[in-house]
Structures are given as C-alpha cells and as structure tokens.
Image (cartoon, helix red, strand yellow):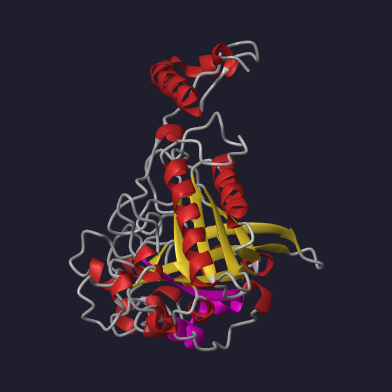
Amino acid sequence: MNEQNTITRRSLLGAAGAAGAAGLVAGGAGGAAAAQTLHDDPTALASVGSATVPFHGDHQAGITTALQARGHLIAFDLAAGAGRKGAAALLRRWSAAAEAMTAGRVPSGDNQIALDAGPSSLTVTFGFGRTFFAKAGLDKQLPGSLAPLPDFSSDELVAAHCDGDLWVQIGSDDGLVAFHALRILQKEAGGAARLRWQMNGFNRTPGATAEPRTARNLMGQIDGTNNPKPSEPTFDRRIFVPASGSDGSPEWMAGGSYAVVRRIRMLLDTWDNLSLERQEKVIGRRKSDGAPLSAGSGGTETTPVDLDKRDADNLLAIASDAHVRVAKPESNGGAAILRRPWSYHDGFRDDGAPDAGLLFVCWQSDPLTGFVPVQRKLDSGDGLSRYLRHESSALFAVPGGAAKGEYVGQRLLET
C-alpha cells in the first residue's frame, strides 16, 4: 500500500473530532440529520467517541470512573510454569496495550476492529486473585484482605464462574471499542494465561436522558443513590488502601482497592408480576424517582431516609426487611462500599425465564469491613433476596495505578 492510501487511526480520530464539532452545531436543525442518506458524508451526533480516561495515575481507572455503556469482566488462570517472570511479562504487555488503546492509539498486534473509532472513555483495570500468589511464587506478598469470602445462604455458585488468578475489567461507551480491547488483551495473554470465565455487561448510554441520572437496573429501580462520593472526607479511607501501609496491607497495594465481583440473576418474571406498590415496599423507595417511602408524597432521590417514620396506621413507612433499611450503613456498623455494577442479559433459560440481572462489582479498602458485613446483613434479612440468585463470586486485589514508564503490578512483581 502506498503512502497516499495509508490511513492511520490518528488521522481518522482527527476527522471524527472535526465532524463532531460540526455535528454539535447541526444538532439544532431538528430532523435534518434524520434525512441523511447513505451517500452523504457521516456527521457525528456527539463527542462520546473522543472522550478519554487517563491510564496512568495514583489509582487505576475504572473504579471512580463514571459508569460506561458497555463492559467485559474476564478472569484468567496463570498457565503452568509461567511463574513470576511470565506474569510480569504478561502485565507489561497488557499495560502497554491498555495505555495505547485508552489514549486512542493503535496497540501492537492490532486487529483493526475499532480502527475508525475514538477511545470512547475506554478503561482497563487489572487485579490479582488469591490463587495467583502461590503460582507466581509470591506467597509472602498475599494480602490478608484477600481471605476467602464466607459462604452466604443465598449463594447458588457455579464453580467454573468463580475466582481466578487474574482479573480484567474493560469499560467503554462504545460496544465495538470494548470488544476490541477484549480481543487485544486475549491475544496478548498468549500462552501465559488461559481464560477462566467472561461476563458481558451494559449500562445506559451517556446522553440517553435529558440530564445525568443515577442508573436503573433491570428491575427498573434507581440503583446507586447512596454510593459514597469522592467529595466525602471518608471516601479515600473507605475505598482505597492507604499509602502508608498503616492498615497492615503490603506496600505494593498502596493506592489500590479490593473488588468483589458477583453475578446476580434477577427473577424478573416473578418480580414483574408484583404490583408497583409491592415492588416499592420491597425496595423502600418509589420506583418513579427513587424517593424514600418515608418522604410520603414528597421528596426526591436524595431525600434522607427516615427509618423511624411511621404512616397513618402507625406502621413503619419503610418495612423492616426493605432493601434500603437493611443496606443502609447505619444498619451495618458504618460499613460502606462503592457499587459500580453492570446489567447483563445472556438470553433465556430452559424454562423461558430471562437469564438476566446484575454483574455486581463493589470496591473497598478492605472487603472484611466493607462487603462482608453488608452482605451478611442482606443475606439474613433483605426482602429483595427472594427475587435474586447469586451464581458466581470472586475477590481481587487491584493494585494502585501505574506511573508513566511503569506497568500495573510492577511494584508486586519486581519486589
């Protein structure tokens, strides 16, 4: 191919950026864009494709990053004989590919799936499972917080879809960009690691609502109202491992976090047969706007939940087993987690029921003081649990972000 006919991803991104600016101006022309024919030059309708999330930083991207429209969760097992050296080479390759793709550059060995797309807020997050450390000869670096999660009565776990040595979370606002990253990382794994399980998720597309809103899950409920916020003074302490190691964590986990991953199937046929009133009582919030039932006919999603409020019949406005009551930090000794889930739909089961629900991902500085006490409380008294089935579970140590010139996990693998 001669030089005049060579098209690079960088040049395509430049053209897309110029088209995006024109598209934003043309957006005020009502239905004009809808009349565009296949012979017209394409006009970008938004700047979604050009959005980037930095790969380097104190923390890995994909933890506090805004929810993306498409996601993949993948676990790998380290190949026999790969050891520490093979693991280090793998993380070096993965980090290089992720850094390139998140910046909108073409990675090594590119398959051109997303050649004409921008990065679309792509993030790639890496973590280590408990079993990784023995296989890599790093037993002394195993964090105490990676202790196996306890059994819960609501668990119906499938072993093949649990755990794993290595974990990758991919998120993007474009499905093709997310799939492209998935394929590149699978190729870069080479013979060093084999796929253990993969889960594919989605969220609402940015710009799909008139203004930014809290996400809804497949039950139609607003989901994530009480998430801790970075502006809160306790946020870093609850979500990220301190740099000082004062909590007993190994130094390589400074700035990192722990991810609990659960595939939770929703019994949607049963749920959808409940009346709206009954659904709202199970959750403790109005379905339309997320306002707590304790607010009566008023309130909004952010109205504080009054657990002591009673109705005209002197009954608790929020039932004793309502999800918001059982999950509230005040009901769990102050335990808090940062929920960053994805919805999923994997077709239909043999009985015709949808195989759909939530890819639950939560982040905390220590799962023993975050997820575990919250889930124990939910497991014993949450009315919502009657409509859920926990089918897979995993826990991963996610190290802090890589500085420029570093790869993720370098401080562990090169200690």
Q: Is residue 132 above or below residue 228?
A: below
Q: Nearer the viewer, residue 264 or 72?
A: 72
Where's residue 148, x and y in %? 49, 85
**Magenta highlight range:** 375-399
Q: Quadrant of residue 300?
A: bottom left
**Placement of the C terminus among the 4 image quadrants:** bottom left
Q: In the figure, is residue 45 to the left or right of 190?
A: left
Instruction: Say which residue appears at 43% left-offset and 22% top-offset.
Output: 14
Is residue 222 in view from this perspective? no
Where's residue 198, x and y in %? 63, 62
Instruction: Say which residue appears at 55% left-offset and 28% top-offset.
Output: 116
Q: In the figure, is residue 269 to the left or right of 101?
A: right
**Placement of the N terminus among the 4 image quadrants:** top right
- Residue 78 among magenta residues: no
Q: Is residue 220 above or below residue 395?
A: above
Q: Nearer the viewer, residue 151 or 159?
A: 159
Q: In the figure, is residue 408 to the left or right of 184?
A: left
Q: Nearer the viewer, residue 311 or 195?
A: 195
Instruction: Say which residue appears at 69% left-offset and 63% top-offset.
Output: 355
